[in-house]
């Protein structure tokens, strides 16, 4: 799929090099300034005792080696946040994928009328503003909110969702799933479209029913898409910030604080060294998952 | 397959594993879809219904599903709220900078990566892929320090700058450029056209769909971006809409002025939702563009 101009000789290659890098300059500047340098600097910061007050002179601070990482490992709230984040991934990713996949299959095969309308509706949450949505969620889930009103109508006493240590996380995850299943659906739809029609026709001629077609054709052929979607979503849920920050700010009792939110809270407290160390842990986790993704992409191309 | 081709297919989806017309499964499928659609759109219903209720009505019966008396009072109060107009202008200015930057940076970089042979090409493409994978939470502290050092803290430029050349835009443009036949460019080269001429006269006029996708995606990213503006904007004069709304919500939560907040939520969501209804093809292209490879 990646057609490249054949190399026509050293002279052209040289001429193109200057032009190409000129074309790449705007991206390169922003990349260096806001990705490359910050990544290296973050690693440097994580090895110092940088506090908020030192910010103007980050080079003047003490180099403390791995102290921050040791402090992290001893910080019970950080370990708790890793577990919270793992829970976010472990529940959020499969749930998002199952919903997205089911809707993609139904939209792709079962129906013809209103397909576009349904796809639009299911995709709408992806483009909505998270601050706005979080407000709606708070309005719906607080003690006298819309959800409890509906529960009351069927005779159930609704809890105070976001203040309950057992219930806050499910609501936060629910918001994540609501915002993301449309993305999974669209990617699965694109994957389904790549399966050639004749495969199904052949299977149908051999007497395979729809379930057997799904089981023996769609699922195996969609494996690359499935792996890709799972990696994308894993990276996304690993970095969960907006939902827990806006709904609960990590509460109640830290039950919804993610690693990303921990990073932010340390930053807010002026503990830039600690914040960067936690960031680095996050970077390693995401890099590991991304590496898997890279491998998968390589094997497909 | 290229992302663009995938999308073209998704647009004109063929009817695979067709359910027989008179089968019992068909009404069941529709019923299930309608149920899912209702659940999905429930939050939108809540926000509209809540925003149309008066303050006293919300106080006396907070969780009601429908307004007893429809009123636009919340929206009027919202636009009279201090700073709100400023937040909106700020969001638009930041979005304009981000969109313009992405069109320029991505069309140039994407063209070079797909159509030019040059030393360091693998390195450059690797940088694009790597940039897409670096988690924001891993770099925001140092990004903030750099922004402070550049003297851009608490400025709209400081909010916009990190997003003016999003790797996602470069990737989308690169994928699109790869689908344009080399023969077209070679013919121009043989005729003696320079690379700039080819880029402006031949490539750009053909790149319309990709430019549209990038415009939409970068506008969406900028309009909805939350953490970075939250960190960089330190005074109300530089708050963008989401940051302003979050700040207003923290202040308003004490008086539970949900009418005002839900009206704000609508004003923040509406432009993107309307844009989405008209141009959803490009939104979907953008998502698939980053996912498909």
Image (cartoon, coloured by chain):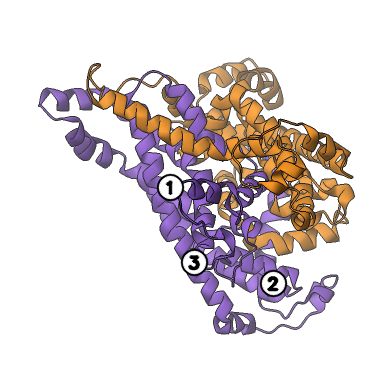
Chain colours: A purple, B orange
Comes first in the chain, label 2 or label 3: 3
Q: Position of residue A153 (x, y in %)?
A: 49, 46
B54 to A89, vertically: above or below: above
Q: Is residue B153 above or below residue B221?
A: below
Q: Nearer the viewer, residue B267 or B173?
A: B267
N-terminal-most mark, 3 or 1: 1
Q: Earlier in the sequence, mark 2 or mark 1?
A: 1
User: In this rendering, which labeled residue sits more in front, label 2 or label 3?
Assistant: 3
- Which element is circle 2 on? helix
* Chain of the residue under label 2: A
Tell me how many marks there are. 3
Left or right: where does residue A279 sit relative to residue A87? right
Tell me which chain the residue with mark 1 is part of.
Answer: A
Residue at 42% x, 57% y: name it: A91
Name the residue: 46% across, 23% down: A116
Q: Is residue B119 left or right of residue A194?
A: right
Q: Tag on residue A177?
A: none
The answer to which of B4 and A232 lies nearer the viewer is A232
Which quarter of the image is occupied by the C terminus of chain A?
A: top left
The residue closer to the viewer here, B47 or A33, is B47
Between residue B173 and residue B190, name the one nearer to us: B173
Q: Quadrant of residue A220?
A: top left
Q: Secondary structure at mark 3?
A: loop
Q: Which residue is mark 2?
A: A266
Chain letter of the residue carrying label 3: A
Residue under numbered circle 3 = A166
* Structural distance between the alpha carbons of marks 3 and 1: 21 Å
Rendered location of residue B293, percent (x, y): 45, 39
Report which residue position mark 1 lands on: A96
- In the shown orientation, is residue B52 left or right of residue A201? right
Screen quadrant of the N terminus of chain A: top left
């Amino acid at each position: 799929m990646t057609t490249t101009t054949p190399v026509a000789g050293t002279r052209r290659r040289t001429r193109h090099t200057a032009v190409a890098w000129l074309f790449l300059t705007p991206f390169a500047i922003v990349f260096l300034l806001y990705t490359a340098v910050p990544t290296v600097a973050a690693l440097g910061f994580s090895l110092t005792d940088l506090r908020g007050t030192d910010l103007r002179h980050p080079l003047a601070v003490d180099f403390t080696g791995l102290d921050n990482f040791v402090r992290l490992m001893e910080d019970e709230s950080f370990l708790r946040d890793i577990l919270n984040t793992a829970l976010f991934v472990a529940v959020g990713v499969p749930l998002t994928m199952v919903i997205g996949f089911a809707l993609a299959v139904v939209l792709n095969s079962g129906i013809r009328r209103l397909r576009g309308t349904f796809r639009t509706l299911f995709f709408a949450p992806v483009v909505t503003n998270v601050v706005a949505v979080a407000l709606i969620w708070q309005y719906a889930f607080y003690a006298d909110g819309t959800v409890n009103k509906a529960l009351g109508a069927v005779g159930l006493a609704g809890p105070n969702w976001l203040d309950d240590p057992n219930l806050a996380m499910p609501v936060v995850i629910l918001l994540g799933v609501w915002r993301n299943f449309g993305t999974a659906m669209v990617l699965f739809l694109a994957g389904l479209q790549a399966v050639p029609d004749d495969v199904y026709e052949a299977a149908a001629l051999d007497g395979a029913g729809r379930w057997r077609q799904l089981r023996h054709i769609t699922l195996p052929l969609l494996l690359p898409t499935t792996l890709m979607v799972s990696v994308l979503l894993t990276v996304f849920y690993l970095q969960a910030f907006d939902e827990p920050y806006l709904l609960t700010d990590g509460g109640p009792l830290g039950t919804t604080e993610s690693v990303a939110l921990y990073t932010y809270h340390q930053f807010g407290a002026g503990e830039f060294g600690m914040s960067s160390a936690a960031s680095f842990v996050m970077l390693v986790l995401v890099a590991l998952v991304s590496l898997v993704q890279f491998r998968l992409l390589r094997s497909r191309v | 397959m290229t992302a663009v081709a995938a999308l073209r297919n998704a647009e004109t989806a063929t009817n695979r594993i067709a359910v027989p017309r008179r089968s019992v499964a068909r009404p069941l499928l529709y019923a299930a879809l309608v149920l899912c659609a209702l659940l999905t759109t429930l939050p939108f219903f809540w926000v509209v219904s809540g925003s149309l209720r008066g303050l006293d009505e919300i106080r006396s019966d907070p969780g009601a599903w429908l307004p007893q008396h429809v009123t636009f009072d919340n929206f009027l109060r919202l636009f009279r709220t201090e700073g709100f107009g400023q937040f909106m202008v700020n969001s638009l200015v930041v979005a304009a900078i981000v969109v313009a930057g992405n069109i320029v940076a991505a069309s140039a970089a994407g063209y070079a990566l797909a159509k030019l042979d040059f030393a360091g090409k693998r390195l450059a493409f690797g940088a694009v892929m790597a940039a897409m994978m670096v988690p924001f939470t891993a770099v925001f502290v140092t990004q903030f320090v750099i922004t402070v050092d550049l003297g851009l803290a608490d400025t709209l430029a400081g909010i916009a700058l990190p997003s003016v050349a999003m790797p996602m835009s470069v990737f989308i443009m690169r994928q699109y450029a790869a689908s344009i036949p080399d023969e077209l460019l070679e013919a121009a080269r043989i005729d003696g056209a320079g690379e700039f001429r080819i880029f402006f006269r031949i490539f750009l006029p053909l790149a319309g769909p990709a430019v549209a996708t990038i415009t939409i995606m970068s506008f969406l990213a900028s309009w909805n971006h939350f953490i970075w503006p939250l960190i960089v904007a330190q005074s109300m004069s530089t708050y963008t809409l989401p940051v302003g709304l979050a700040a207003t919500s923290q202040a308003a939560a004490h008086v539970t002025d949900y009418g005002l907040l839900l009206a704000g939520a609508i004003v923040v969501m509406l432009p993107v939702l309307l844009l989405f209804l008209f141009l959803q093809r490009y939104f979907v292209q953008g998502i698939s563009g980053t996912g498909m490879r």
